[in-house]
Amino acid sequence: MAIDDHGALRLPDPSVVVLVGASGAGKTWWARERFPAGSIVSSDELRAVVGRDEADLRASKDAFDVLDLILERRTRRGLTTVIDSTGLDPKARAGWLDRARRNGVAAHVVVFATADAVCRSRNRERATPVPSKILTGQLRAADEARRAVLDEGWDGVHEPAEVVRLVPPQFVAAPVAARRQKDDPMPLDFGLQISRFSWPDSPAATGERLAALAAEAEDAGFSSIWVMDHFLQIPPVGREWEDMLDSYTTLGFLAGRTHTVRLGVLVTGITYRNLAHLAKIVATLDVLSGGRAQCGLGAAWFKREHDVYGWEFPPIAQRYALLEDALELLPLMWGPGSPPFTGRTTSVPAAICYPRPLQERVPIWVGGSGEKRTLRLVARHADGCNLFGDAATVRHKVEILRGHCADVGRDPADVRVTHLSTASVVAPTGDRPHADAGSVDEQIGRYRELGESGVQTAIVSIPELGHDPGALSRFADVIAGFR
């Protein structure tokens, strides 16, 4: 059971919660005390809707047809739904579980092992008791159901707890993982991604605001700062007409206003610049930052941006060819001599770049987690990869990467794994402004799970950055949990 330190049962929101137990087991009372009324779908109440009253057993089939329809609509919208029925029919349970799976919602069971005598006593007190013979059958079926649900594939089978907390899925097991981090600490680096520049100041104050945020990030313990390589704000983050600074100009500014953080673009769109010129830009950033540059590369995806700025947006296969050329050419540009280069899309008569980067090799990261192409390129050429998703997804991707490393004879330990996510620590009010906001312990647990899955650097985008003065200082407590 996902029980936190206060004894509360933690369930993912959204989820399907199926109550299993005979009539009189206390399911309805338990659910009404712990879940919003609108999230509970009661088969008894639906009998009263489609039949004479709640005891009209002849209306049962129609009532369950309506229940299934409600469940379908709610799970399709990502809404937590509690099914308040006996839950004793294996076929019905299988249907509810299948519907949750098809709509991408977690599915949990709460089993009520209430004593037979208590169920019978409560049943006698009802205005319309369930017939004794039917209740006897339910009690027998309840014993069977308590054993059967353990093997039916539910995400969790639980006892009815006193307190239920509905939390975003990534935080369900966080308290347990946070305890592991406290008892057996593991290291984890944190990077900060700055993805928005539309702050409540005038544009003239943007530089000072950015410098202040960077200084605060260093003080908070972030080891790197990253920006996006976009010229229009991207749809998942904001609106097209929001302010968006040029990536490498911004990093050049930050190089002069920071001291310890490494600086990178997550990730450089490979279609936006001549590859040799890109090598020169990164080398310059490394020199001016005192050897703190990191080079993130990606195949680019935002067609609207290409159309607006007049850049060619070639088919994906050609973009991957361009990406592989960059992975081969950039180290040549930064290395000794001036050898010629002929790649799949690019030819350079002499790989000349002076001054050289201060680092012997500027680390190259590849963004994206495509299993067949992207991670294979990482294994062959890159120093690191940037992944997305929950801990289970990351664990799977890391295994794929290790397989590609084995194919090319490379030690997977030579490839550093980063992970980009949205996260913030809730303000003292305790309200979650978005699904990725959590307490310090919840975030420590979340990142502990990611660390156990293979992540070595967690890159965090904080939505409140620049608008909430305490956002960075609150997240500093998460970083401190991994020192």
Image (tube, grey):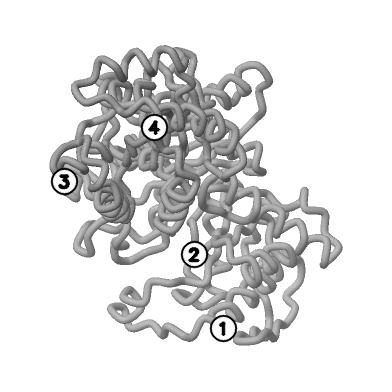
Q: Earlier in the sequence, mark 1 or mark 3?
A: 3
Q: Are marks 3 and 2 in contact (CB under 8 Å)?
A: no
Q: Nearer the viewer, mark 4 or mark 3?
A: 4
Considering only vertical position in the picture, is 387 above or below 334?
above
Residue to which mark 4 is pinned? 134
**Callout 3, which amino acid?**
Gly
Image position, residue 15 (x, y; %): 39, 42
Tell me which amino acid carries mark 1.
Ala
Image quadrant occupied by the N terminus: top right
- At x 36% / y 51%, what residue is drawn? 195
Q: Which of marks 2 and 3 precedes in the sequence?
A: 3
Residue at the spot 64% in from the left edge and 84% down from the top edge = 348
Query: Does the residue at mark 1 contact the one at mark 3 (Cβ under 8 Å)?
Result: no
Residue type highlighted by circle 2: Thr
Disc 2, SS = strand
Where is the C terminus found, in terms of image quarters? top right
Frontmost residue, 42 versus 271 = 42
The percent position of residue 22, horizontal first and vertical second, equals 41, 28
Q: Mark 2 sits on what residue?
A: 268
For marks 4 and 3, the one nearer the N-term is 3
In front: mark 3 or mark 2? Answer: 3
Residue bearing the label numbered 1: 317
Q: Is residue 128 left or right of residue 168?
A: left
Distance, label 1 to label 4, CA atoms, is: 65 Å
- Residue 444, given in percent of the width and then of the height, sits at 51, 27
Specify few, some or many for label 3: CA neighbours under 10 Å numbering under 14, 14-19, or 20 or more: some
- Report which residue position mark 3 lands on: 51
